[in-house]
Image: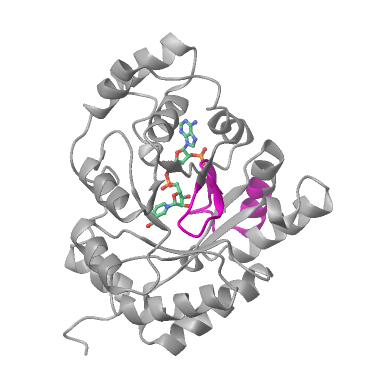
Amino acid sequence: MQYITLNTGASMPMLGFGVFRVPDKQECFEATLEAIRTGYRLIDTAAVYTNEDAVGEAVRAAIAEGICTRDDLFITSKIWVKDFTDESTADKAIDASLKKSGLEYLDLYLLHQALGDYFAAWRALEKGYRDGRLKAIGVSNFYPAVLANFCETVQVVPAVNQIELHPWYVQAGALANMRDYGVVPEAWAPLGGGRYALENETIGTIAQAHQRTPGQVMLRWNLQRGVVVLPKSTHAERIRENFDVFSFTLTEEEMQAIASLDMGYSGTRIKHFDPEFVRSCLGTSRISR
Ligand SMILES: NC(=O)c1ccc[n+]([C@@H]2O[C@H](COP(=O)([O-])OP(=O)(O)OC[C@H]3O[C@@H](n4cnc5c(N)ncnc54)[C@H](OP(=O)(O)O)[C@@H]3O)[C@@H](O)[C@H]2O)c1
């Protein structure tokens, strides 16, 4: 495992396991435990994924099996937009995440979207960070202008910004902006959501040259440019495959060939400025208010 140092001084694993779209408790529990058995130490959940409880159970099972201690693990969750209304609501949401997961602290807690009154929610996260419930705090889906303004304004600069990053959405400008503020970049959908990984010719050729799979090449590419990756899978063989990315190195030419696949927009087609998306996150609209 490779680690990266956060602005808190803590070490964060550069490869983690994501559990988005695994609402079934048993499936999430089994996949997360399989991931920890495989060697993953970072687990990425969120209040809105409705599986913080299953992740907490897998953590306890792994500790009971003697695979690791709580200190070895790095558990991330995220506060959802509906709890951004004011500081006290956000503070309760932190406690709800802790209660659901059954954990005494979270290693990282993120604002899930730059929507609603995220400054009020951030003040609650700053409080949680100061009182030790949250070992580090960060943001997700904060694009450069929003992140720069945020970092210049808040008391605690986010440790991490989790955004969509894969060869079809390279986001070099966003990475440069994060570097300026010492914010660690973390990739969601590092396999492009799984839809293109096995099909692209450039990635396929590079994978063959290294006797690796396309998915492994995609993960390795982000790791080599300093980006933390969070592949998701509910299949044991893929969980293991996605973990085996530390024993080969892409050449500079291969790195550039992969970066040239950039389409410059979200491969998962989530449009953060789409009124319908924004309204669905906020659970309200100007009209209904
Ligand atoms: N902050 C945010 O707004 C946000 C948004 C999206 C995601 N995330 C986080 O990022 C994590 C990863 O993102 P994601 O789940 O959307 O996408 P992803 O990890 O890029 O792709 C997951 C998909 O790829 C498939 N897959 C997994 N390993 C594979 C392999 N080796 N070869 C081919 N296909 C493979 C999976 O199928 P199987 O499960 O069937 O193997 C699944 O359908 C999430 O779980 C979540 O923790 C955060």
Q: Is residue 283 visible?
A: no
Q: Is residue 194 above or below residue 98?
A: above
Quarter of the image for residue 40 reads top right
Quarter of the picture holding the N terminus: top right
Q: Position of residue 97 (x, y in %)?
A: 57, 72
Q: On screen, 131 above or below 2?
A: below
Q: Nearer the viewer, residue 93 or 128?
A: 128
Residue at 44%, 32% in the rendered image: 219
Residue at position x 59%, y 37% from top? 235
Q: Residue at x 43, y 59 (%)?
A: 159
Q: Does residue 193 appear left or right of residue 68 in this picture?
A: left
User: What scheme was used to colour the molecule?
Assistant: one colour
The boundaries of the magenta stretch are 5-32
Image quarter where the C terminus lies is bottom left
Observer-nearest of 272 and 40: 40
230 vs 199, left or right, is: right
- Name the side, left or right, on which 96 lies relative to 276: right
Residue 11 visible within the image: yes
Depicted 252 relative to depicted 182: above or below: above
Find out whether residue 198 is within the magenta segment.
no
| Residue 206 x, y percent position in the rendering | 37, 15
Please check the rendered image and state whether residue 19 is part of the magenta-colored stretch, yes or no.
yes
Going by the picture, which residue comes out furthest to the top? 209
Residue 287 horizontal/vertical position (percent)? 16, 85
Q: Ligand 1, what quadrant?
A: top left
Residue 17: percent from left, percent from top:
55, 46
Q: How many marks?
A: 0
